[in-house]
Image (cartoon, coloured by chain):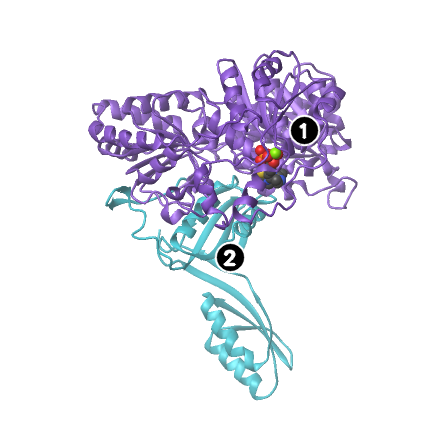
Chain colours: A purple, B cyan
Amino acid sequence: MARQMTGAKMVLQALKDHDVDTVFGYPGGAVLPIYDEIFQQNDIRHILVRHEQAAIHMAEGYARSTGKPGVALVTSGPGATNAVTGLTDALMDSIPLIVFSGQVATFMVGTDGFQEADTVGITRPCTKHNWLVKDTEKLAETIHQAFHIATSGRPGPVLIDLPKDVQFATGTYREAKAARVDHYQPQVKGDIEAITRLVELMETAERPVFYTGGGVINSGPGASQLLRELVDGTGFPITSTLMGLGAYPASGKSWLGMLGMHGLYEANLAMHGCDLMINLGARFDDRITGRTSDFSPKSTKVHVDIDASSINKIIHVDLPIIGDIGHVLEDALKIWKARGRKTNAAAVAKWWAKIDTWKKVNCLAYTGSEKTIKPQYALERLEALTKDRDRYITTEVGQHQMWAAQYLGFEDPNRWMTSGGLGTMGYGFPASIGVQIAHPDSLVINVAGEASWLMNMQEMGTATQFRTPVKQFILNNERLGMVRQWQELLHGERYSSSWSESLPDFVKLAESFGWKGMIVSDPADLDDAIMEMINHDGPVLFDCLVEKHENCFPMIPSGKPHNEMLLSADAEAFKGGGALV
Amino acid sequence: MSALKIKKGASSHSVYDLRDSHSQVESSHTLAVIVDNEAGALARVIGLFSGRGYNIDSLTVAEVDHKGHLSRITVVTRGTESVIDQIKAQLGRIVPVHEVKDLTVEGTPVERELALLKVAGTGDKRVEALRLADIFRANVVDSTLESFVFEITGPSAKIDAFADLMRPLGLMEVARTGVAALSRGV
Ligand SMILES: Cc1ncc(C[n+]2csc(CCOP(=O)(O)OP(=O)(O)O)c2C)c(N)n1
Ligand SMILES: [Mg+2]
């Protein structure tokens, strides 16, 4: 049924048709017609942010924690340019977003009009796709296509740039099912012959390991379920990237912990020593592989990914399978069962015995303290006191992020939101608000560093206004800790600009926005304080003063192979080693 | 999005025959990229090459199917086999890209380029330029008493050779279209 309506109304109609309940945004001249439509309806909630970057991160948090696409709305010019960091973040981490930006009227485009920016030009490399819509007749179809492209194949952010006259003009609203999306239909089923070969490899492997990534999460909860079945059925060890945590439960018996630059000793050595590596939806990022020429030298490598360009980009693999993880896992399980559920159990048991010797190194051990709160201790206590709750965790970027990945356990997918690919300081706080909007009754905690947290602290107002009881758990080391760690290990302890100077009084800051503020410095007070934070019905800014010069280990200095990992005791000997990136 | 079309074959532990070794030898490939004829499609392709540091030796674009709204971009690029594979896979991810054909893998393609060359000179040089143009089957499309504009079509190497010969004879300006290419046979 085709109906006539204005472009602005079409935006709202299309959002409703795609079951959108929330839009994160910030108004301005070029989007006023859309804001006028928002005002006149009650189906879609608009969350007014305090900075457009935060709108995108909130939409990311919303998307990652629900599996639905996130939606944001920004004005032209500065509104759009402020969104660029968030778009890049979402592109790197494959988060589905639909972002609308206002634009000057079509007859003004190209004249350097007030608040004009070449938004499609600027965002072309940081979106999966983008459109400048010049004709209201094409708007509805474009929005439907945008939802299709953002959510199918490897997900990602898309942007629709909307000139103001297109919002005002009247056109025909076409239904979603009439939209042409036929030429963009990524392959979801994997090649059965290749999957059979994977099963054959699994049947004979002596030292197998599953290496899983964000693709498993993006494939949906069904994929995580199938992964658990396959891992537990075969008894093979499993490790995951930062982005894939929660796909396999941390309490599962085959779990090795995270791998990579700050991954666990046993996980990295298993990757180095395996004879069969099964990569499910991970992309051989440089934080994972270390020096590629020495990466897992003796293994047959299988790579399952929905994005053909991820295959053989960094590491040459022996068996590529292009398809959706869930579909491929389903076929793999079916074939493995039909062939009699075979594994080389004796060899795999020997492999586990070897892995157990690595586990005994206890790589996450740290020196405790009665006087100061060690950041690792703070996270251990946070884990102990919150793990049985309906809990979502976001993080900022830095040492605290890596410690959170090491010391917190994730039992389910979509419970862990962190900026992996771009490493965006300032991500975690707005993301936590986005998660809380989607899950109003859950416990949402942002594990933060004080420096990262300040990068989007203006969102305190948003949290207060929309009554999101987010808990900001700041591991305050008064340092740009991760930068300081590199300077200590690689730059002769010359701490160039890595202090957090002139920090605010976080308690007063919290109170000024109507939040609860807390400050804790004595390890003995920590448990009670964490409980007080959890039990407070409202947003809490938790200033946890921690050891200032703690380093995050294990660490594979960049450009080194997995078996040259530094443990805390090795660090002293390594100083001055030099790393590239 | 086009899937990797890897030929099936046999290697030690792979169902797919990827490549014998990870060759570091660079070779030139002519790619035909079929895209929706819409604003920004060319920018996406060019942005991919510059953003990811790939080479463009030649690039041409024009609409080839008015009804279907499709353009054909012909790119001549260089790289090791794995870089070429990456380029094709990355091109395949661009939403308005319908198809990526590697004409070099399908066999030596038919490649043609058109060039216009302005050569100024009098006396012997002028006569020699005209004689060489005849040998290369270049046409004179403009002439004054002191100059010619030659039109020449052929593989890029032929145009290079002709331009080299014209240089000492008073070559002033060259305009080249870039390569248009089709695979041979059906
Ligand atoms: C926007 C941005 N700028 C700079 C960096 C580089 N960087 C990575 S970690 C870090 C320090 C983070 O400090 P803090 O948030 O206090 O965390 P800590 O490492 O101390 O736990 C910096 C500056 C970044 N990742 N993002
Ligand atoms: Mg810090």
Whether residue A188 is visible to the viewer of this picture, yes or no, is no
Label 2: chain letter: B
Q: Chain of mark 1?
A: A
- Residue A344 at x, y = what percent? 21, 29
The amino acid marked with disc number 2 is Ile
Q: Secondary structure at mark 2?
A: loop
Q: Is mark 1 within 8 Å of ligand 1?
A: no
Badge 1 and badge 2 both on one subunit: no
Q: Is residue A280 visible?
A: yes
**For the residues marked 1 and 2, what is the alpha-carbon distance in whole angstroms?**
37 Å
Q: Quadrant of the N terminus of chain A?
A: top right
Which circle marks residue A242 in the picture?
none
Q: Amino acid at mark 1?
A: Leu
> Which residue appears at 43% of the width and 52% of the height?
B83
> Quick check: A147 left or right of A317?
right
- Horizontal and vertical percent for residue B117? 57, 72
**Ligand 1 quarter of the rendering:** top right
The one of A416 and A262 positioned closer to us in this rendering: A262
Q: Residue at x 36, y 24 (%)?
A: A227
Residue at which label 2 appears? B56
Please name the residue that numbered disc 1 is placed on.
A73
Category of crowding for the residue at label 1, using alpha-carbon neighbours closer than 10 angstroms: few (below 14), some (14–19), many (at least 20)? many
Relative height, residue A312 to residue A459 (above, below): below
Examine the rendered structure and indicate whether residue A108 appears above or below residue A472. Answer: below
- Locate residue A433, reporting x and y percent: 63, 22
Name the one closer to the observer, A482 or B111. A482
Q: Up-down: is A121 above or below A252?
A: below
Which corner quadrant of the image does residue B89 belong to? top left
Pointer 2: residues within 10 angstroms few (<14), some, or many (20+)? few
